Image (cartoon, rainbow, N blue to C red):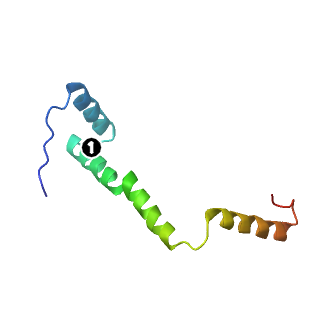
Amino acid sequence: MSLLQIRDVPDETRRALKARAASSGRSLNAYLLDLLRREVARPSVSEVLDRAARRAEHSTASALSALQAARDERHDQTGGPAPR
């Protein structure tokens, strides 16, 4: 494991973090480690966009045609109003 040090944390911020840690029954260190783990587990915006772009490269149909096909299928199954 590595040591991570954060400098110049405002007193008000530290107090708020310490209070949140205490209210969840954890030490400040355990609370901050959990915060960091959750942050790293979430993909960044650029990662999400990259993933979406890679998926789009493999797509053979447009989203509009897929939606229209689903509407047509639902209409055929239910006999409901004709899709627009």
Q: Label 1 neighbourhood size at 10 Å, few (<14), some (14-19), many (20+)?
A: some
Spot occupied by residue 67 in the image (x, y as percentages of width and height) = 69, 63
Q: Quadrant of the N terminus?
A: bottom left
Q: Is residue 48 above or below residue 77?
A: above
Q: Can residue 65 be seen here?
A: yes
Q: Amino acid at mark 1?
A: Arg
The residue that mark 1 highlights is: 26
Name which residue lies at 48% across and 70% down: 57
Q: Quadrant of the C terminus?
A: bottom right
Please give left or right for residue 59 compared with residue 8 in the image.
right
Q: Identify the element where label 1 is drawn.
A: loop
Spot occupied by residue 19 in the image (x, y as percentages of width and height) = 29, 32
Q: Is residue 28 above or below residue 69?
A: above
Between 46 and 12, the one nearer to me in the picture: 46
Please give left or right for residue 55 compared with residue 17 in the image.
right
Name which residue lies at 66% across and 62% down: 64
Between 48 and 13, the one nearer to me in the picture: 48
Spot occupied by residue 5 in the image (x, y as percentages of width and height) = 13, 43
Please give left or right for residue 1 compared with residue 83 in the image.
left
Q: How many marks?
A: 1
Residue 49 found in image quarter: bottom left
Q: Is residue 24 above or below residue 43?
A: above
Q: Can residue 43 be seen here?
A: no
Name which residue lies at 58% across and 74% down: 60
